Amino acid sequence: MSVHLVGGGWPADGDTAVFSRFIVEAAHRAASAGRAEPRIAVVAVRDGDAEAHAAKLVEVAAAVGAFVPVVTAVAHGGDVPPSAFADVDGVIVGGGNTPAYRDALEPRFGELRRLVAAGTPYLGFSAGAMIAAERALIGGRAIGGVTVSPESGDQGLDEVTVAPGIGLVDVAIDVHVAQWGALSRLVAAVEAGIAEGGLGIDEETVLIVGEGGLEVQGRGSVWRVLPAEHGVVVSTIGA
């Protein structure tokens, strides 16, 4: 099974590209367990609108195919309980404040790694994509006090910050890249050695990490930033 990293942005009506492979994989896993419809954990960590955000994730994913949502909606500062991932065929982790998601899910990182290793597909949407990394880029707009990216994506942090993530991918992930001007943050983080390498995902775009390598689907691009002898090398992976 695969790890599906979505750069955020709600898809247009009828556009199912970013969720399609994930739902198909979850359905296959459910069928092997004798279930007619997959049970999918849907996690939202937000202040004031966690349930609404979870409902929107269910709505856009269900446009691909029917499933049984197992919703966990918690406010900032809350914990995601172990029961959130019990007997599920897929996991969706939503968007919002990345540090809040990381804190709420940190006690469950081991369980998430075990689920994915056992074949359960994971879909991270925006913040859920960022925390999927082993060393997660969780926000910030400056390095050493020098601004490297717009305030819109700083997640409430001044300095660009990397923290332990779930560990499903081995490079840093950034999101809303073309829309929020976040490529400069990823470039600066890799050049400064804060991250060893990174992938930046545009909105309405999914990067699928599976046994066959990297695959991109959706309307945008994935930006690959790798260290080089005299700085960094930037390239794109298109759908």
Image (tube, helix red, strand yellow):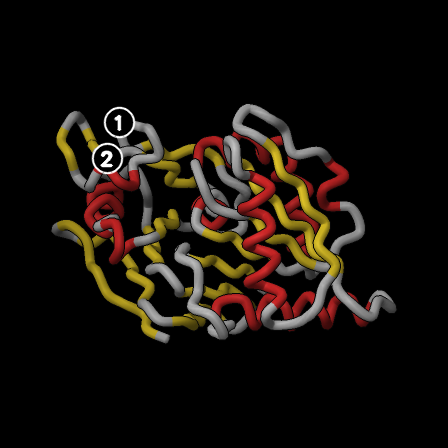
Residue at (55% x, 24% y) in the render: 77
State whether residue 189 appears in this view. Answer: yes
Q: In this view of the protein, which residue sits in the foreground, 155 or 62?
A: 62
Tell me the element at label 1: loop
Q: Measure the C-alpha gap from mark 2 to mark 1.
A: 6 Å
Residue at (48% x, 35% y) in the render: 164
Q: Do the residues labelled 2 and 1 touch (CB within 8 Å)?
A: yes
Tell me the element at label 2: loop
Q: In this view of the protein, which residue sits in the foreground, 130 or 205?
A: 205
Which amino acid, by three-letter code, is at mark 2?
Arg
The circle on residue 158 is 1
Residue at (54% x, 46% y) in the render: 53
* Residue 183 position (above or below residue 44): below
Mark 2 vs 1, N-terminal side: 2
The image position of residue 54, as x and y in percent, is 59, 48
So how many labels did they put on this image? 2
Quadrant in which the N terminus is drawn: bottom right
Q: Quadrant of residue 105?
A: top right
The image position of residue 226, as x and y in percent, is 27, 55
Quadrant in which the C terminus is drawn: bottom left
The circle on residue 141 is 2
Which amino acid, by three-letter code, is at mark 1?
Asp
**Could you tell whether 48 is left or right of 71 in the image?**
left
